[in-house]
Image (cartoon, rainbow, N blue to C red):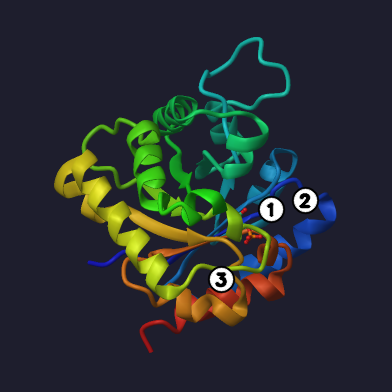
Amino acid sequence: MAALPYIVGNWKMNGTRAMLNEARAIDRSAARFPKVQVGVAPPATLLYRVREAVEYIGVGGQDCHARDNGAFTGDVSAPMLKDAGADFTIVGHSERREYHSESDADVKAKAEAALSAGLAVILCVGETESQRDAGDAEAVVGSQLEGSSPRVDGAPEKLSVAYEPVWAIGTGRVPSVEDVAAMHKSIRAKLVAIYGSAGADVRILYGGSVKAENASELLGIADVGGALVGGASLTAESFLAIVGAAASLGD
Ligand code: PEP
């Protein structure tokens, strides 16, 4: 059976308690779209409160440390996210890779820590604009996957990959349908090379300037199993328009 489309909001470093109203509104409406899996990743400070405020949607972290505990000031571990009520965590977002100098090995260790803690994982990969211009996009993403895909026990059903071209994040620019299709095909082949036939079932999300206006087109591309959404996830109205587009896919 094909997995449900998965629409995940990444709130990044946005949100105080006032945002709980958005979470509640997202949750209420998501209940009307049972054919779409919905999640939000609020800042760590809000995770527990969002968990308490919602019933239907998943709640996740935006990152986790590779170690379970210790002298790592300011960091949050995977067991802590789990304890706060998280279902999943994002790892390897390009903003973490860039601003926190996270390597593929770091991302892999984080993903493995998250899986060990019982969290599902959304592993982000994506090329920069200069890498795409140089014709290296698929090679770069393939190498990120080789370096950061976690070891999994058995089937990797708790793993999703988010293809997020760095140049499309927060810019309003999106790759062509052909480029997204080609990249998702290449990611699929790499996942099968890494995980064997189980790699065929790993969900591959697209992320980068997904909005109500382009959601149907992007979500309709072969092997696009959902979307990781930044800016447009910050209000229930704009996020739910994307969830609605995902719900209408099979119509
Ligand atoms: C993201 O940062 O994961 C993202 C997809 O952001 P945006 O939707 O704002 O481009």
The crowd level at tag 2 (other Cα within 10 Å; few <14, some 14-19, many 20+) is: few
What's under tag 1, amino acid-wise?
A: Trp
* Secondary structure state at the residue bearing disc 3: helix
Question: Circles 3 and 1: CB distance less than 8 Å?
Answer: no
For the N terminus, give its image quadrant. Answer: bottom left
Residue indicated by mark 3: 30
**Residue at left 57%, top 25%?**
65
Quadrant of picture, ligand 1? bottom right
Residue furthest toward the left?
Answer: 197
The crowd level at tag 1 (other Cα within 10 Å; few <14, some 14-19, many 20+) is: many
Residue indicated by mark 2: 14
For the C terminus, give its image quadrant. Answer: bottom left
**Residue at left 73%, top 67%?**
235
**Residue at left 42%, top 74%?**
177
* Secondary structure state at the residue bearing disc 1: loop
- Please state which of the two labelled residues, at mark 3 or mark 1, is closer to the viewer: 1
Q: Is residue 244 above or below residue 133?
A: below
Whether disc 3's CB lies below 8 Å from ligand 1 is answered no
Q: Position of residue 109 (x, y in %)?
A: 44, 25
What's under tag 3, amino acid-wise?
A: Ala
Residue furthest toward the top?
Answer: 71
Residue indicated by mark 1: 11
Instruction: State the CA–CA distance, disc 3 to disc 1.
Output: 17 Å
**Residue at left 58%, top 43%?**
94
Q: Position of residue 18 (x, y in %)?
A: 84, 57
Q: Is residue 150 above or below residue 87?
A: above
Q: Is residue 55 above or below residue 220?
A: above
| Label 3 or label 2, whichever comes before in sequence order | 2
| Label 3 or label 1, whichever comes before in sequence order | 1
- Please state which of the two labelled residues, at mark 3 or mark 2, is closer to the viewer: 2
Instruction: State the CA–CA distance, disc 1 to disc 2.
Output: 6 Å
* Secondary structure state at the residue bearing disc 2: loop
